[in-house]
Image: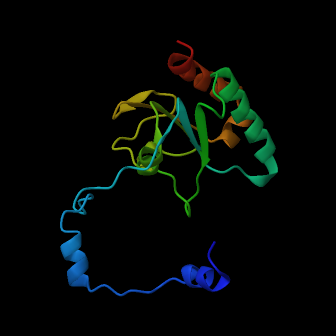
C-alpha cells in the first residue's frame, strides 16, 4: 500500500516538452492522411424532407395543422420525415439537405425551386426528378389554408409519390 506521500507524487502530472522534429520522426507513418477528406457526417435517412417558408404568426397554428394533415395522409411522421422551416437569414437549400439527409423526396412549401438551389424552375404540383430526388413545389401553407383547390392539386401530386 503506497503512503500518502507516494500517492501525491503519483497524482502529479509531469510536463514534458518534446521537440517538433522528434514528434514528426516518431509519427512519420500517420494513420490518417490529411489530404484525404474526413469521414462524412452521419446523414439521417428520411422518406421525405419537407421545407417550408415560415408562416405568419396569426395563422401559424392552422398552417401547422394543415402540414400535420398532409404528413398523416402521406403516412409520414417524425421517424421517416423531416420538416424544416427556412427564411432568408437561415436559408435551407438543396446543398444543406444533401449534407444532412438521405432522401428520395423533397416537398417545398412557398419556396421557388430555383431559389432552393435547383438547376431548373418548374410550376407547382409538378413532380420533377433531379439527382434521383423527386421534388414537388407547392404554394405556401398560408396560401393553401383557405383554398381547397390547391389542397386537391397537392394531394393528387403527393398520392403519386407516397400512396402508389
Left or right, 122 with reference to 38: right
Q: Is residue 141 above or below residue 7?
A: above
Q: Residue 45's x, y, as percent?
A: 50, 35
In this orientation, which residue lies closer to the viewer: 11 or 43?
A: 11
Left or right, 149 with reference to 34: right
Q: Residue furthest top?
A: 164
The picture quadrant where one finds residue 67 is: top right
Q: Residue 128's x, y, as percent?
A: 40, 30
Left or right, 57 with reference to 8: right
The picture quadrant where one finds residue 20 is: bottom left
What residue is shown at x 31% (from left), y 84% (from top)? Answer: 18
Q: In this view, does 163 lie above or below 82?
A: above
The quarter in which the N terminus is drawn is bottom right
Residue 68 in sight: yes
What residue is shown at x 33% (from left), y 44% (from top)? Answer: 119
What residue is shown at x 24% (from left), y 56% (from top)? Answer: 36
Q: Residue 136's x, y, as percent?
A: 49, 32
Amino acid at each position: 500500500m503506497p503512503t500518502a506521500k507516494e500517492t501525491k507524487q503519483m497524482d502529479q502530472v509531469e510536463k514534458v516538452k518534446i521537440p517538433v522534429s522528434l514528434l514528426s520522426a516518431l509519427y512519420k507513418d500517420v494513420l490518417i492522411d490529411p489530404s484525404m477528406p474526413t469521414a462524412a457526417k452521419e446523414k439521417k435517412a428520411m422518406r421525405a424532407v419537407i421545407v417550408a417558408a415560415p408562416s405568419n404568426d396569426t395563422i401559424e397554428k392552422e398552417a401547422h395543422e394543415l402540414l400535420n394533415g398532409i404528413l398523416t395522409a402521406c403516412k409520414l411522421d417524425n421517424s421517416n420525415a423531416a420538416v424544416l422551416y427556412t427564411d432568408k437569414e437561415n436559408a435551407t437549400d438543396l446543398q444543406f439537405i444533401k449534407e444532412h439527409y438521405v432522401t428520395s423526396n423533397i416537398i417545398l412549401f412557398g419556396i421557388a425551386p430555383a431559389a432552393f438551389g435547383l438547376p431548373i424552375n418548374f410550376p407547382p404540383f409538378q413532380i420533377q426528378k433531379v439527382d434521383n430526388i423527386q421534388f414537388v413545389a407547392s404554394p405556401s401553407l398560408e396560401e393553401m389554408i383557405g383554398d381547397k383547390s390547391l389542397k386537391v392539386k397537392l394531394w393528387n401530386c403527393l398520392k403519386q409519390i407516397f400512396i402508389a
